[in-house]
Amino acid sequence: MKTIKTSLLAAAVVSAFAMPAMASDINVKISGRAHLSLDHLDNGVDSGLNVSSNSSRLRFAASTEVAEGLTAVMQLEQNIRFDEGNGSFATRDSFLGLRGDFGLVRVGFFDTPLKVVRGRTDMFGDRVGDARNITNVPTGAAGANFDNRFRNGVHYRSPAMNGFTFDLQYTPHNNTGSTVENERESYSTSLTYNANGLYAAAAYESYENAAGDNPNALRLGVSYDVSKEFKVAALYQAARNLENGNRNVWGVGASYKIEDYTLRGQFYQAGKNDLADSGANMIAVGVDRNFGRALTMYAVYGLTSNDDAAAFTIASGGRDTRLTPIAGENSAGFSLGMIYNF
């Protein structure tokens, strides 16, 4: 793995140095998303009405063609809490890189190739019913979140070849500060096919957590545009070296457009690990009202059914206001939301 990683990065760097310099304009773009929802959340014992800002963001991006066939790229993205009036600087995809015929090389803090697969197949990303409620270990268990961004990431993406793209990310130290022992070393890689309405990807990730373990996961994801109106998706995850043993997860989803409306639904199941009665099922259904790309209004209902020893939620992934689950209790949520892209 290290030999492949070094060779790919070296080839990209050599290509960059060999290109003649040239002057070019700097292209700067400001964009983002405001996503808020009004949610009635129920953990099986108590319930309440909440307002949540869900992965709302402000993004600054810049690019400059610095040589023929070579472009410098930069992005700074931060979370904005529209619900509580605060936010965190550079907590989302933020990086500096080079793009050319060799592909893309970047360094920074951004989604891993494994995380991207879930995002491409999730029908309720950042909403009640998000697939991350099931793909990640329940609240209170240690070291098995497979939808994180790695700190100090170094990433290579190949150019698309007949629809195929290869991604490799390496993190020498997935923590703050410096290191002399490369603790918390992490890898994430994927092979993706994307053409003619078909997206298919296989990804693998392994990282060293604070306990020194190496949780790892294999993900297989697919989505297909059956028609302009109808889309289907599926995800399978096999996670290993978890706190309480291995766990498999699978899910399926679909969406159907009717003029300005989109009907969507998905079902996910988490198998049990070494603990008895530790599995869960999640179902979510919803409808969107689309006003072009800029504005979407939606309604979602979701339910997570937990076994006696399981504590999965219905409202955690991608949301700033989260529902803490109770082991053995069902978790439910009804959400009315609005997404504005600018």
Image (cartoon, rainbow, N blue to C red):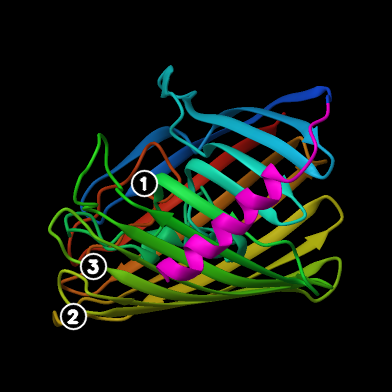
265 part of magenta stretch: no
In 3D space, how far apart are the residues under numbered discs 3 and 2 (Cα atoms)? 25 Å
- Foreground mark, 2 or 1, reads 2
Q: Amino acid at mark 1?
A: Leu
Rendered residue at 17%/73% (across/down):
308
Mark sitting on residue 134: none
Quickly name the residue at label 1: 41
Q: Residue at x 60, y 49 (%)?
A: 105
The reply to whether callout 3 and callout 1 are in contact (CB within 8 Å) is no
Q: Residues within 10 Å of mark 1 (few under 14, many from 20)?
A: many
Which of the two discs, 2 and 1, labels the residue nearer the N terminus? Answer: 1
**Residue identified by numbered label 3:** 214
User: Mark on residue 277?
Assistant: 2
Q: Secondary structure at mark 1?
A: strand
**Sequence-first disc among 3 and 1:** 1
Magenta region, residue range: 1-22
- Can you give x and y, in whole percent of width and height, for residue 31 in the image? 69, 28
User: Under tag 3, what secondary structure?
Assistant: loop
Q: Nearer the viewer, residue 188 or 158?
A: 158
| 286 left or right, relative to 199 | left
State which quarter of the image contains the N terminus.
Answer: bottom left
Q: Give amino acid for label 3.
A: Asn
Considering only order in the chain, which callout, 2 or 3, is on the residue closer to the N terminus? 3
- Closer to the camera: disc 3 or disc 2? 3
